[in-house]
Image (spheres, rainbow, N blue to C red):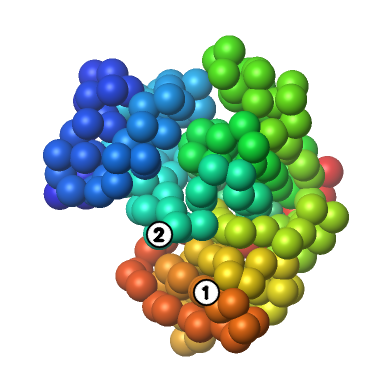
Amino acid sequence: MAWRSHGDTNTELVNNLKDNGLIKDERVREAMLKVDRAHYAPRSPYEDAPQPIGHKATISAPHMHANACESLLPFLYPGARVLDIGSGSGYLTAVFANLVGPSGAVIGIDHIQPLVDMAETNMRKSEEGRKMLNLGHVRFVKADGRNGFKDEAPYDAIHVGAAASEHQKELEEQLKAPGRLFVPVASEDGYGQHVYVVDKKEDGTVERKKLYGVQYVPLTDAPPE
Ligand code: SAH
């Protein structure tokens, strides 16, 4: 099912994801309809598949983007503050921005400057994207995501688009209470990765829930410039 949602247009792709049960919530469908994947994926943008974007990075498959949105959705309310770590193409950052609206704020960070620049260029391809960048609702910043981004913390939602080698306390500390972190983490035995949803409760306690196995680009040291 996950790979059968290809479309000839962005609208077709998004509606197929919905029909195949990969998008469940109408808010996610609407936000994904507003962001044309062709502005972010270099070729075959309406295939439900990951694509290389250079610098050893990939834009994730649309069903993975949908799933990240669905998982974080209760914390992506209008006005929420969001951190997107490993923002790569900038696609998901833009979808988050549509979910939290003009009263919210989304920061995309990546440790490779050309990808930070690419994400901004991609988002500037639409009038809506230009507006959000110009008004400061969305910012792309070069930083090491393993440290989160303290300057703008705390966040309602943190998304990590690359696999961490272990649970990063620093990211949990930068969540609001309540707040939610979506993070792929490598297994301790070195084989495979799993997505975790980490909830910080109102009383500050943290609960980690292991979801499903995935294959993400690892969260690494920045390559030498
Ligand atoms: N959500 C993005 C995923 C890009 S792939 C998209 O769908 O387009 C993962 C990204 O994580 C890459 O762009 C890579 O440069 C970035 N990355 C890897 N390690 C990082 C680190 N330590 N800090 C910040 N970004 C990192």
Local secondary structure at mark 2? helix
| Mark earlier in primary sequence (2, 1) | 2
Looking at the picture, which amino acid does disc 1 mark? Answer: Asp
Q: Quadrant of residue 33?
A: top left
Looking at the picture, which amino acid does disc 2 mark? Answer: Ser
Count neighbours of disc 1 (C-alpha within 10 A) and say few if under 14, some if 14 to 19, many if 20 or more: many
Task: Specify whether 179 is left or right of 105.
Answer: left
Q: Quadrant of residue 172?
A: bottom right
Where 206 sits versus 88, above or below?
below
Depth check: give the residue in front, 196 or 133. 133
Q: Tell me the residue at 64%/82% (across/down).
A: 204
Residue 50 location (% of width, % of height): 39, 42
Where 87 sits versus 203, above or below?
above
Residue 134 location (% of width, % of height): 74, 21
Residue 90 location (% of width, % of height): 58, 36
Task: Specify whether 116 is left or right of 127.
Answer: right
Where 85 sits versus 40, above or below?
below
Labels in figure, total = 2
Q: Tell me the residue at 56%/35% (across/down).
A: 101
Task: Specify whether 135 is left or right of 128.
Answer: right
The Cα–Cα distance between marks 2 and 1, rounded to whole angstroms, is: 11 Å
Local secondary structure at mark 1? strand
**Residue indicated by mark 2:** 71
Q: Quadrant of the C terminus?
A: top right
Q: Is residue 47 visible?
A: no
Where 152 sits versus 105, above or below?
below
Depth check: give the residue in front, 137 or 220. 137
Count neighbours of disc 2 (C-alpha within 10 A) and say few if under 14, some if 14 to 19, many if 20 or more: some
Q: Tell me the residue at 54%/43% (across/down).
A: 78
Mark linked to residue 199: 1
